[in-house]
Image: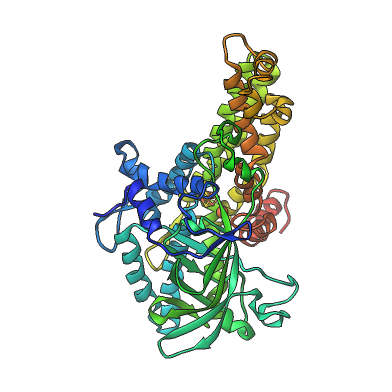
Amino acid sequence: MYMMTAEQYEESLRRLNLVVYMFGKRIENVVDDPIIRPSMKAVAKTYELAHRPEHEDIMTATSHITGKKVNRFTHIHQSIEDLVKKSKMGRLLGRETGCCFQRCVGMDSLNALDMTTFDIDRKYGTEYHKRFVKYLAYVQDNDLTCCGAMTDTKGDRSLPPHKQADPDMFMHVVEEKQDGVIVRGAKAHQTGAVNSHEIIVMPTITLREPDKDYAISFALPSDTEGITYIIGRQSCDTRKLESGTMDRGNLFFGGHEALVIFDNVFVPWGRVFMFKEYDFSRQLVEQFAAYHRQSYACKVGVGDVLIGAAQTAAEYNGVEKASHIKDKVVEMNHLNETLYCGAIACASEGHKEPSGTYYVNTLLANVHKQNVTRFPYEMARLAQDIAGGLLATLPSEKDFKSDTVGKWMDKYYKGRADISTEYRMRILRLIENLTLGTAATNYLTESMHGAGSPQAQRIMISRRVNMQEKQRAAKRLCGIE
Ligand code: SF4
Ligand code: FE
């Protein structure tokens, strides 16, 4: 058994030589950068909790290839129970961190590739699955974090990859060599990219024959020569550079996304899991997407934090007994638990694929993610309603601690007499962080577009519902032959 501790994970990242840019400058020390570090700490939680006896059952699994205990984030689901535990793990970590903990994308890539490589080999007699399993053993044995890279930059959305004015709008092979391929392109919005040891690339859309050079899937160490990361901005990100911590809301954790550029990068054959099998691109995209839509159980955990914050803000204002406040908190809980139902249901209704991998019910996974594109927004609205306008007009920590005006803030921003003004400010900052600040990037916009924008789920819902069965039922009852 080898599972890294949080400290070992942090140290392992220090050994990477990533090319990372932010605010126009190369970041030499990524791990200690004040803007990036909270996101690393969030991933570190996935390591820390795996060592805690009370979370062992949820956070760890038994590898089907080595029989060893592994972190669940590197595991290939072997049962319905595994799928259900995956959903529970997402909620647990969302609640612990109050943000995106980033490691799910790699887990979902591994599971999708386990199925797709198996199916490609069955059709074409290739050896992708064997290669993949060897790679998986490496990931499990070293307890690695993988960045799952699917979303291409896509250029003109009306054109397929080969018709783009710039061929690099989708990741593609520019040269085939004896020992591997050279790839070029970029992957956008890559969650947790610079906190990852490995990057797993997959195509982003269904591809046809003229696009076969774009049908490429592979994995590389994250610090491979030719890969560059540009960190995305988040609302209120520079508050992390301020000397105090109160105005951050969440003192410990955050997420990050990056644009990842592959500028003529070499991939050895041993790490290529699909090449030119364009007829499997749709399967790989759909399988990854369905798993990742399940992974949005994470937002239920973040929702738990938001509900807790809203209730606390109400108590600090002395309004928690007002019937409309109680009703709003009930509404938030109803929405959040409805999300949880979807995350559990798509897992419970999963099934075994020919590769032996357990796969979620895709209809329910898509319904779940469609709910995630909506309910967090309503929950954020309710939390802001409960919190009151001070959420958006509160002066800074520096004013609160100022020798001259601090006393006025302390006096006039007091709510209930037995609660310190500072605590009232802290809970409001947390709600601000979740609904307007750095974490809103994850709780709201990522809920909208992560794992595919809402329309992508609606397409899958329309494909997966059994309409004939519904029509038969209706017609039978009213006497239509
Ligand atoms: Fe995981 Fe959720 Fe972050 Fe996606 S948004 S990587 S599912 S924590
Ligand atoms: Fe995501």
Instruction: Tell me: 7 left or right of 338.
Output: left
Instruction: Tell me: 32 left or right of 437.
Output: left
Q: Which residue is outermost to the front?
A: 403
**Residue at position x 35%, y 39% in the image:** 55
Residue 180 position within the rendered picture, expressed as x and y whole percent measured from the top left: 43, 84
Residue 352 position within the rendered picture, expressed as x and y whole percent measured from the top left: 41, 60
Instruction: Tell me: 182 left or right of 259.
Output: left
Vertically, is 152 above or below 174? above
**Residue at position x 34%, y 75% in the image:** 130
Vertically, is 301 above or below 223? above
**Residue at position x 52%, y 77% in the image:** 216
| Quarter in which the N terminus is drawn | bottom left
**Residue at position x 50%, y 48% in the image:** 39
Camera-side residue: 134 or 283?
134
Camera-side residue: 25 or 433?
25
Q: Which residue is outermost to the bottom?
A: 178
Camera-side residue: 123 or 275?
275
Q: Which residue is outermost to the top?
A: 417
| Quarter in which the C terminus is drawn | bottom right
